[in-house]
Image (cartoon, rainbow, N blue to C red):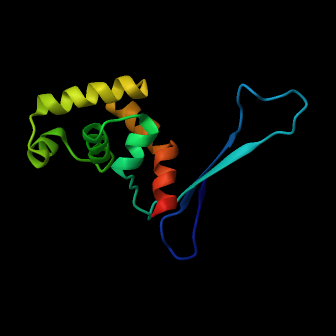
Amino acid sequence: MRIPRPSQLRPLSVLVAPLTGKGARQGRRGAAVLYVRDPESPQTTSAAVLADVYGLTASEAKLLQALIEGKRLEDMARDFKVTINTLRTHLKSIFRKTDTKRQSELLSLVLSGPATHAARETS
């Protein structure tokens, strides 16, 4: 759902989801998690946090951070002074480590996961 703000900024996005897991016991009270996203707040995640959360090398984490920022592989190759083939090799390794197959799936996982929350809490 979207929650409008009196400040005329873009509305907050809110998602309420049931909190489930393998350890849930029958007869236990229900639990939920509430995600609130401020679209006015930039989505940033440090490479160090990405490396720690997903078990990535420094180069892989740097590549993933650039993908989160919306950069293209061609631009990253120039900025990082590596070939596109090197970046593709790193990307394949990231897919394997995160159990994903496509960039969209990878970004969805990362942007909804703990790495983005940890980055916000430490900044």
List the single residue furthest toward the bottom.
Answer: 7
Front residue (pair 89, 31): 89
Residue 101 in view (yes/no) = no
Q: Say whether residue 38 is left or right of residue 103.
A: right
Residue ID at (87%, 35%): 28
Residue 71 in view (yes/no) = yes
Residue ID at (45%, 44%): 111
Front residue (pair 49, 45): 49
Image position, residue 61 (x, y; %): 31, 41
Residue ID at (71%, 32%): 20
Q: Say whether residue 32 is left or right of residue 10.
A: right
**Within the image, what quadrant is residue 51 found in?**
top left
Image position, residue 47 (x, y; %): 34, 48
In the image, residue 68 sits, relative to residue 44, either above or below, namely above
Front residue (pair 119, 3): 119
In the image, residue 115 sits, relative to residue 108, either above or below, namely below
* Number of marks in the rendered image: 0
In the image, residue 61 sits, relative to residue 23, either above or below, namely below
Image position, residue 31 (x, y; %): 77, 42
Residue ID at (45%, 55%): 119
**Within the image, what quadrant is residue 97 found in?**
top left
Where's the C terminus, which quadrant? bottom left
